[in-house]
Image: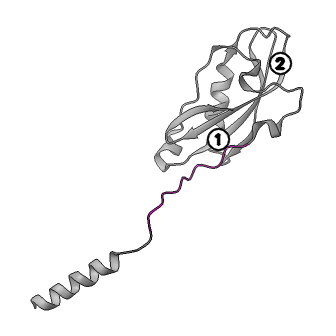
Amino acid sequence: MKAAWLIAISLTITGCATKEVFNPKSQYPPDPWVKGYSNPDDCLGGEQLAAKEFALPTYPRRAFNSGRQGWVIMKLDVNASGITENIEVERSVPDGLFEDASRDAVKRWTFQPPKEGALRNCRVLLRFRAGDVTLGG
């Protein structure tokens, strides 16, 4: 009986052994090249914008609980008073997960009045990664 038990344990241990090295892989989709979505006359993120009120989106609970990560490119205009207008999601990965939180946050952003007047087609990358939200470049 002891011999059978020892054989079973050794087979189990041998079956678990592997020569492959574990390499964790991120499920975070690669960041997009935001300038690739814009035209030369468009404003990009911080190049012409000076924030007054600027809170990043809240990581959606559904995404956090399921370990989902992604990004959103927001397109917006900033009027001569520094208020955001014409806010839209230009692209997001994965679709349908981070758009609402991004849109809600951007609606509340305000900026110093732009020196050159209203800015059109500004693009901002919002990264949702490991429960945290950051701005992309």
Q: Residue at x 67, y 47 (%)?
A: 93
Q: What secondary structure is the stretch in magenta mostly built from?
A: loop
State which quarter of the image contains the N terminus: bottom left
Name the residue tied to disc 1: 71
- Image height check: is 17 above or below 117? below
User: In the rendering, at what x and y percent does residue 31 appear?
Assistant: 67, 43
Q: Determine the residue positioned at 68% across, 38% down.
A: 72
- The residue positioned 61% from the left and 19% from the top of the image is 54
Q: In the image, is 80 to the left or to the right of 101?
A: right
At label 2, counting other C-alpha atoms closer than 10 Å, the crowd grade (few under 14, some 14-19, many 20 or more) is many
Q: Is residue 18 left or right of residue 66?
A: left
Bounds of the magenta segment: 21-32
Q: In which quarter of the view is residue 105 placed?
A: top right
Kindly identify the amino acid type of the residue bearing the numbered disc 2.
Answer: Leu
Residue type of the residue flagged with mark 1: Trp
**Residue 129 sits above or below residue 13 on the image:** above
As drawn, the label of residue 29 is none
> Is 91 inside the magenta-drawn segment?
no
Task: Find residue 96 and report its image quarter.
Answer: top right
User: Who is closer to the viewer here, 16 or 74?
Assistant: 16
SS category of the residue bearing label 2: strand
Q: CA distance from mark 1 to mark 2?
A: 23 Å
Residue 29 in the image: state x and y as whole percent.
Answer: 63, 49
**Foreground residue among 3 and 122:** 3
- Quarter of the image holding residue 10? bottom left
Element on which disc 1 rests: strand
Q: Which mark is residue 119?
A: 2
